[in-house]
Image (spheres, helix red, strand yellow):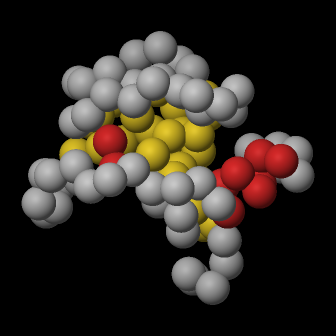
Amino acid sequence: MWDKPNVPAPPQTVFEVSAPFAATAPDEISLNVGDMVKLKILFRDGWSWGVNVETEQTGMLPLDCLWIPGSSGTLRSQSVRYESRQAFDQGLDF
């Protein structure tokens, strides 16, 4: 599964935002603590294509900003976009 640059997220994969994120690229969405996001596609570089349930915005978001049950709950340094950036640059339609 992880030999591909991206994989579909499991159905109904919804997570709470635990750290804010300000979008800096046109394909990214901003996140506020407490927002709920539904993930659509997961990238190996630590980013996902998803939907902010509160704002209904769709775009790229860093997985590091999400609270994932069973994780340590600490925010790592933000992942550098590589494969997810290539997908956007190639104009892939999500």
Image quadrant containing the C terminus: top right
- The location of residue 80, given as percent across then percent down, is 52, 56
- The location of residue 93, given as percent across then percent down, is 82, 44
Q: Identify the residue at horizontal 60%, vertical 66% (top origin).
A: 7
- The location of residue 26, given as percent across then percent down, is 70, 27
Q: Is residue 4 left or right of residue 66?
A: right
Q: Is residue 27 left or right of residue 55?
A: right
Q: How many marks?
A: 0
Q: Is residue 83 left or right of residue 63?
A: right
42 shown above or below 64: below
Q: Quadrant of residue 83?
A: bottom right
Q: Is residue 17 left or right of residue 39?
A: left
Q: Residue furthest right?
A: 90
Q: Can I make out residue 13 in this image? A: no
Q: Identify the residue at horizontal 57%, vertical 21% (top origin).
A: 57
Q: Identify the residue at horizontal 39%, vertical 50% (top origin).
A: 78
86 or 7: nearer the viewer: 86
64 shown above or below 16: below
Q: Identify the residue at horizontal 57%, vertical 82% (top origin).
A: 1
- The location of residue 22, given as percent across then percent down, is 45, 24
Q: Residue furthest top?
A: 55
Q: Can I make out residue 6 in this image? A: yes
